Image (tube, rainbow, N blue to C red):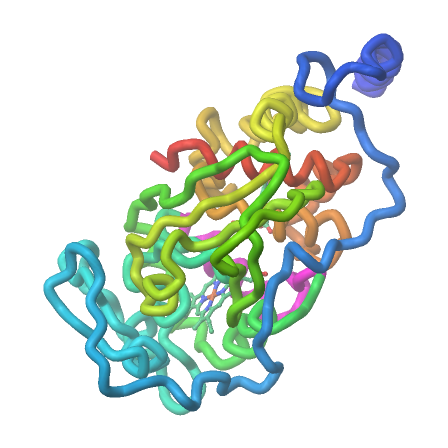
């Protein structure tokens, strides 16, 4: 086994020399980064929220908003209600249990306030639809004991730590069983480009300034196609992710060949179409910004609960460019 790894390693070095000048999008082994120096880039963790937990005191409670395809209307204030999250499409999911739709007053907020009633989640939090129940329970426990942290612990990425300590094991188990039954629909589109529309952070996500472009500069920038619909917790709003040219091809190579050889090919553990196997979570078709944040957090060791050991080996040699590429490619796959 050791010998095999060594042989593969030597092959990589030899081939790398031959292809050192070739563009990163061409075939051949993926060049690994230095295993030590890595710092999490601030741009992967957008937030303009204050650390205090009540950022929405001025929400409008009069204007009735509508979204395409939904026969109901809600105010922005209702969209910010943590104990009665708005449900635009009640027919799109089974009846949800109490911890999901109501939570427990005063502080244990309903999961659906952030993760949405159908578990579609949002880039700043996480998809829960279709995650194994056992995995959901384990992650909430890891948030609770803070073995799962974020490489950049800005609001809102610390909210699960606070909440996980408030939810009872029974509430988490009920919510986990519910979300595990649901199916994810991909809502993102990937654009490879040298530039990205000018943008700024609004709340917890980037949104377009309205005019002009700026260089992509190695970043992965995900934005809702309609910021107002995102703010109204519309589970059908679509998101676009800009990444540098060549990212999808590079991502495909990393995913299929494995960043450190075939044993780290993502399908080895996440299943043939990255749809998950047993307690290993599905990753196909999820928000690229979420996926990137997780890869970065494994890489810095901030996410280091006991079950994450296999991932630490996977990301050890990955550069930021590799992670951006892998997140974009995995996010572009169909989740079912
Ligand atoms: C205030 C918003 C909020 C609420 C309410 C909330 N979460 Fe979260 N949750 C988050 C955020 C933000 C993340 C992403 C953390 C990160 O990226 O590190 C997250 C991540 C998760 C994850 C990790 C998913 C993965 O793929 O690893 C699980 C599991 C989870 N939440 C379960 C729950 C459950 C169950 C509830 C309700 C009992 C709940 N959450 C309520 C904000 C919330
Ligand atoms: C040796 C097994 C193994 C391989 C290979 C592997 N993973 Fe994982 N991965 C896991 C396990 C196990 C977890 C769950 C970790 C936990 O419970 O905290 C995970 C979690 C993740 C997560 C977090 C998912 C979430 O919902 O938060 C991402 C993202 C991820 N892997 C991406 C990848 C990518 C991309 C590759 C290929 C480059 C890959 N993984 C290869 C075992 C593996």
Residue nearer the viewer, 301 or 13: 13
Above or below for 28 versus 335: above
User: Which residue reaches farthest front?
Assistant: 211
Task: Tell me if 10 is positioned left or right of 275 in this view.
Answer: right
Q: Is residue 288 above or below residue 301?
A: above
Depth check: 55 or 194 in front? Answer: 194
Q: Would residue 298 be counted in the magenta stretch?
A: no
At 79% from the left edge and 24% from the top edge, which residue is drawn? 31
Identify the residue at horizontal 62%, vertical 26% (top origin).
246
How many dots with numbers? 0
Q: Which image quadrant: the C terminus? A: top left
* Residue 237 pos. (x, y %): 33, 54
Residue 130: x and y in percent read 36, 47
- Residue at (55% x, 37% y) in the render: 328
Residue 10 location (% of width, % of height): 88, 13
**Which residue is pictured at 50% across the width and 36% down the height?**
191
Residue 289, relative to residue 284: is it above or below? Answer: below
Please give left or right for residue 317 compared with residue 127 in the image: right
Q: Which quadrant would residue 77 be assigned to in this image?
A: bottom left
x, y percent for residue 244: 63, 35
Placement of the N terminus among the 4 image quadrants: top right
Residue 173 visible? The answer is no
- Magenta-span inclusion, residue 135: yes
Left or right of 104 on screen, residue 259: right
Can residue 57 be seen by looking at this rendering? Answer: yes
User: Residue 235's quadrant in the figure?
Assistant: bottom left
265 relative to 57 in the view: left or right: right
Q: Which segment is the magenta one?
A: 131-151
């Amino acid at each position: 086994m050791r010998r095999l790894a060594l042989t593969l390693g030597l092959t990589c070095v030899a081939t790398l020399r031959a292809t050192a000048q070739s563009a990163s999008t061409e075939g051949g082994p993926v060049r690994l980064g230095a295993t030590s120096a890595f710092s999490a880039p601030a741009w992967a963790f957008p937030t303009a929220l204050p650390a205090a937990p009540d950022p929405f005191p001025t929400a409008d409670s009069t204007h009735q908003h509508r979204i395409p395809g939904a026969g109901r209307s809600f105010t922005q204030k209702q969209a910010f209600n943590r104990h009665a999250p708005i449900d635009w499409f009640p027919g799109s999911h089974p009846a949800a249990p109490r911890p999901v739709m109501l939570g427990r007053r005063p502080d244990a907020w309903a999961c659906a306030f952030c993760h949405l009633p159908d578990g579609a989640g949002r880039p700043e939090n996480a998809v829960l639809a279709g995650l194994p129940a056992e995995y959901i329970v384990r992650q909430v426990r890891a948030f609770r004991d803070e073995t799962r942290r974020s490489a950049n612990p800005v609001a809102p990425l610390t909210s699960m730590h606070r909440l996980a300590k408030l939810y009872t094991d029974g509430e988490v188990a009920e919510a986990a069983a519910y979300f595990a039954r649901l199916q994810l629909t991909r809502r993102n589109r990937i654009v490879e480009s040298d530039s990205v529309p000018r943008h700024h952070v609004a709340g917890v996500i980037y949104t377009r300034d309205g005019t002009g472009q700026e260089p992509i500069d190695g970043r992965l920038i995900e934005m809702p196609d309609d910021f107002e619909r995102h703010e109204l917790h519309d589970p059908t709003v679509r998101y676009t992710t800009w990444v540098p040219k060549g990212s999808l091809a590079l991502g495909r190579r990393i995913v299929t060949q494995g960043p450190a050889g075939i044993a780290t090919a993502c399908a080895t553990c996440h299943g043939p179409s990255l749809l998950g196997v047993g307690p290993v979570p599905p990753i196909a078709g999820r928000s690229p910004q979420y996926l990137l944040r997780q890869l970065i957090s494994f890489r810095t060791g901030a996410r280091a609960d006991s079950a994450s050991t296999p991932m630490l080996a996977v990301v050890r040699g990955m550069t930021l460019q590799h992670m951006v590429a892998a997140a974009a490619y995995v996010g572009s796959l169909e989740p079912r």
